[in-house]
Each structure stands twice: as structure tokens, then as C-alpha cells.
Amino acid sequence: MPSYLYRLDHRGEPRYVLEENGSARLVEGDPFGRFSFGEEVQVNGGKLLVPLAPSKVVGIGRNYRAHAAER
């Protein structure tokens, strides 16, 4: 059976959850580094969030040179 990693709103906080073999557990720590499993939770009906929270957003426009010259 496959495993699924979710990011969801758990009691007002974004949390990662690993679902495998029919049960889902909170991920304590960094899911891409050192982690352990916390309490078992229900994912049915929970609010799913985007998979990763961006640390920054970079936008580049086609008219960047003209916009920079305005400043």
C-alpha cells in the first residue's frame, strides 16, 4: 500500500501528516530531515494546504529594464 505525505490545517496550525496502511500520524520535526511520528489523526474532512510553504516569492517582469530606469 502506498504512503502519502499531506500538509493540512490541524487545530489551526499547518502540520505534515504521513498516511500509510490505513492510518495517519502527525510528523514531528522536519519531514525532509529528522522527524518522528506523533499522534494518530483523521485526515477525512480536514483542510488540505499547499504541499510546501514558500520562503520567498520572486517575480520577474518582461519590462524589468524599463521599470528599473523609472527609479
Image (spheres, rainbow, N blue to C red):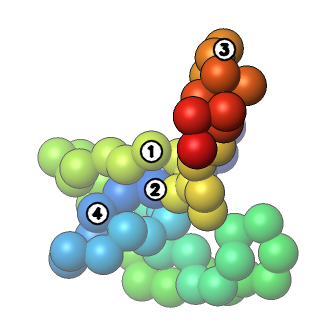
The residue that label 4 is drawn on is: 9
Circles 1, 2 touching at the beta carbon (< 8 Å): yes
For marks 1 and 3 on the same chain, the one whose residue lies earlier in the sequence: 1
Circles 2, 4 touching at the beta carbon (< 8 Å): no
The image shows residue 62 at horizontal and vertical percentages of 66, 14
Mark 2 vs mark 3, CA separation in Å = 34 Å
Report the residue that reaches farthest toward the top. 62
Q: Does residue 19 appear in this view? A: no
For label 3, the crowd category at 10 Å Cα-Cα, with few meaning under 14, some 14 to 19 and many 20 or more, is few
Q: Nearer the viewer, mark 1 or mark 3?
A: 3
Q: Which amino acid does label 2 sit on?
A: Arg
The residue that label 2 is drawn on is: 7
The image shows residue 44 at horizontal and vertical percentages of 23, 47
Mark 2 vs mark 4, CA separation in Å = 7 Å
Rendering quarter of residue 14: bottom left
* Element class at badge 4: strand
Q: Which residue shows up at 53% across the image and 57% down it?
A: 53
Q: Which of 31 and 24 is in front in this view?
A: 31
Q: Does residue 55 appear in this view? A: yes
Mark 1 vs mark 3, CA separation in Å = 28 Å
Mark 4 vs mark 3, CA separation in Å = 37 Å
Mark 4 vs mark 1, CA separation in Å = 10 Å
The image shows residue 15 at horizontal and vertical percentages of 43, 70
Q: In this view, does 44 lie to the left or right of 25?
A: left
For label 4, the crowd category at 10 Å Cα-Cα, with few meaning under 14, some 14 to 19 and many 20 or more, is some
Q: Which of 41 and 60 is in front in this view?
A: 60
Q: Which amino acid does label 1 sit on?
A: Val
* Element class at badge 1: loop
Q: What residue type is labelled 4?
A: Asp
The residue that label 1 is drawn on is: 50
For marks 4 and 1 on the same chain, the one whose residue lies earlier in the sequence: 4
